[in-house]
């Protein structure tokens, strides 16, 4: 689940769960949505224009990547 202050989530501090070292870590900041967008853009090449996606859609695609990201970022 992603929480954000009032207004456009792309320009606000956002709290969400990102994958770090194979685990979900709760983080807050402007970078949360940016990182989610970068990850889904790399894996889902047929996404519509990213500016037209709603926050829940970005989160939906990112949640679909979590198992893969956990596996790829797991420390060896």
Image (cartoon, grey):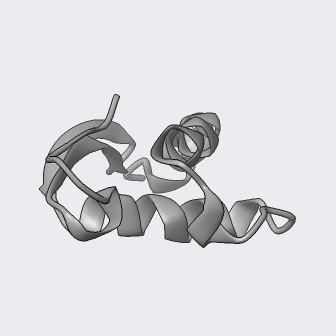
Q: Residue 4: horizontal and vertical position, in percent?
A: 21, 45
Q: Residue 25: horizontal and vertical position, in percent?
A: 22, 40
Count of numbered badges drawn on the protein: 0
Q: Residue at x 73, y 62 (%)?
A: 43
Q: Is 72 displayed left or right of 9 in the figure? A: right
Q: Residue 46: horizontal and vertical position, in percent?
A: 87, 64
Q: Is 25 displayed left or right of 64 in the figure? A: left
* Residue at the outermost right position: 46
* Residue at the outermost top position: 1
Comparing 72 with 38, the one in front is 38
Q: Residue at x 33, y 37 (%)?
A: 23
Q: Is 58 displayed left or right of 74 in the figure? A: right
Quarter holding residue 2: top left
Q: Residue at x 51, y 37 (%)?
A: 56
Quadrant including the N terminus: top left
Quarter holding residue 35: bottom left
Quarter holding residue 39: bottom right
Q: Residue at x 33, y 47 (%)?
A: 18
Q: Residue 55: horizontal and vertical position, in percent?
A: 46, 46
């Amino acid at each position: 689940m992603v929480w954000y202050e009032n207004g456009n989530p792309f320009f606000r501090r956002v709290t969400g769960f990102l994958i770090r070292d194979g685990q979900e870590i709760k983080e807050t900041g402007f970078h949360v949505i940016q990182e989610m967008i970068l990850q889904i853009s790399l894996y889902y090449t047929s996404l519509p224009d990213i500016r037209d996606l709603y926050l829940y859609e970005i989160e939906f695609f990112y949640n679909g990547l979590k198992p893969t990201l956990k596996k790829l970022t797991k420390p060896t």
